[in-house]
Amino acid sequence: MPNFFVDNSDIQFQFNNLDLKDIVKIAEDNYAQAKDFNYAPVNYEDAIENYRKVLEVVGDIAGNFISPRAPEVDQEGAHLIDGKVHYAKGTEENLKQLSQADLMGMIFPRKYGGLNFPFTMYVMAIEILSRADASLMNIFGLQDIGDTIRKFGNESQRQEFLPKFCTGEVTGAMALTEPDAGSDLQAVKLQAYQDSDGKWFLKGCKRFITNGNGEVLLVMARSEAGTKDGRGLSLFACYGDSTVKVRRIENKLGIHGSPTCELQFNDTPAQLVGQRKFGLIKYVLDLMYRARMGVSAQALGISQAAYYEALKYAKEREQFGKAIYNIPVVTNMLIDMKEKIDSNRSLFYATALTIDRKEKLEELIEKLKSEGKPFSEETQKLKYEIKVANLLTPMTKYILAESANKITHDAIQIHGGTGYMKEFNVERLSRDARITNIYEGTSQMQIVAASGGVINDILAEYFDERERREYKGGLNRLAGFLKEIREIYKEALKYVMDKKDATFQDVAGKDLVDLYSYLYVGYLLLNEAEIEPKKIYTANRYILNSLANAKKNFESIKNENFSDILHADEILI
């Protein structure tokens, strides 16, 4: 009986070594919630044990029920009948099981029926479920819609919507994209208007809406007539009632279990969430942290599934009198896949902790404000966590999504011709992976988002502290290689900035972000290798590969390999 939480030693390592003490303390009101809820933890150890038990339930459902249904879900897909979206039969069964296990409200406060889990534990569940069926993440992972209402809506809205999410009565959708407003959300045109009684209504079209058939829609709309930029946009919550028409379900390459809809809003009654004009500049930007991390978890789960499929096939498939697992070039591919997945997981959960710290500090500051207590120290900490989150979130999505595409590609290669056939899971996983470096912002947009933090070297103090450390055994040698990479980064950054050329800086952004990621992930792996000797192999391969790649990144910048972009019109004719 497979359990996708228990059977993954690296997830177990991450879970056992996550430092959630400060996060859980704030989330549990210094464990005062145990007075009001007899199932709330009484201390940190109690909380961790609770998280473990719930994740074991997630792993059991994922491994024994969701994963076996995934091929049929992919084949059947979601379909539109008489204007109504119907999930695949397997998807309906999956959602029913998750609801019965009280998992559809993992991140919501207990007073609304939720489990009050930290973000880090929630995205661990998303990774596990994505390994089983990546399309399910696009429904289960939309608990963040309700969380945005919790954070920025009023208490009446929380009481109305959140309990319905927790029971599984409703699922959500984030309706942002329009035909002419993809990555450029400032171009949103869908109209929000008020009647004579001050009630809000929505009119217009949204496209490429994940789970657009959801019962609760969070919609960004233009509330300020005559405006054309982000300052005229507000956020609204509405029901997917008869005034919202699903015009079509997109016929997609992958993620077939998740319906991607085109929606027409026909004077749809809506509720303003938060303040007018803050839809994009505050609320959606806040939501994007979680959306990007949801896709990163999805990419990580797909990668893990593809690796396991490739490993299993390599051990079973014999050629030339032996399993292809024992052919060195195949073995090396598998080790590369494992090293990439484990290093990506280290980055992912470090980023998740950053977002957890950011969000919990925001909650703590609001609490201290309401109690009339000082909060200057917390404000300073929050400023730093926001800067780090602004760097790590797009960096994580870029790296994990690109990796998922490479890992699924290699998994098919190890399968040979059979991997190209629909009877084998890697074919589906490869199709599912392809969207991860596109939606919630393409890899190119993630590089742009991360490059500011890289150029400003916001982790400089962190790297300084790591460089002063003494690592045990052979790890000091690897630490020396990271120092060398840092010197390469500094030299590359100086070269780029000395050019004083904005276009050159933009195009060099990818190489600079790559260089910075080698450093950050490299030090994460060094720390892990001091805890777990098996991690030394991952750290060694990752850091040696990173040093070689760092030299290539710098040569690319120094040789101005992309300077021909200035002549694009001549080249691309």
Image: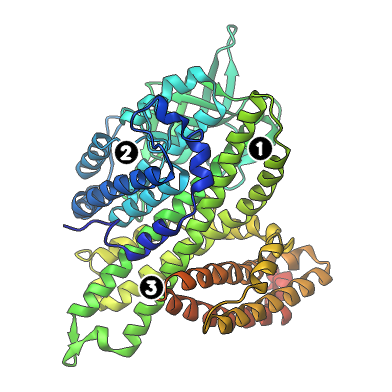
x and y, in percent, of residue 337 in the image: 39, 74
Q: Residue at x 48, y 58 (%)?
A: 348
SS category of the residue bearing label 2? loop
Q: Quadrant of residue 194?
A: top right
Is residue 188 in sight in this rendering? Answer: no
**Residue type, label 3:** Lys
Q: Which mark is residue 103?
A: 2
x and y, in percent, of residue 570 in the image: 69, 72
- Cα separation, mark 3 vs mark 2, equals 29 Å
160 lies above or below 165? above
Q: Callout 2 environment at 10 Å: few (<14), some (14 to 19), or many (20+)?
A: many
Number of marks in the image? 3
Q: Nearer the viewer, residue 297 or 87?
A: 297
Q: Quadrant of residue 300?
A: bottom left
Q: Which mark is residue 281?
A: 1
Residue assigned mark 3: 338
Q: Residue furthest bottom?
A: 320
Q: Quadrant of the N terminus?
A: bottom left
Q: Is residue 85 left or right of residue 118?
A: left
Q: Nearer the viewer, residue 3 or 420?
A: 3
- Cα separation, mark 2 vs mark 1, equals 31 Å
SS category of the residue bearing label 1? helix
**Between marks 2 and 1 in the image, the one whose residue lies nearer the viewer:** 2
**Residue type, label 1:** Ile
SS category of the residue bearing label 3? helix
Q: Nearer the viewer, residue 485 or 249?
A: 485
301 lies above or below 82? below
Q: Say whether marks 3 and 1 touch (CB < 8 Å).
A: no
Q: How is the image coloured?
A: rainbow
x and y, in percent, of residue 407 in the image: 39, 70
**Residue type, label 2:** Leu
Q: Residue at x 53, y 83 (%)?
A: 544
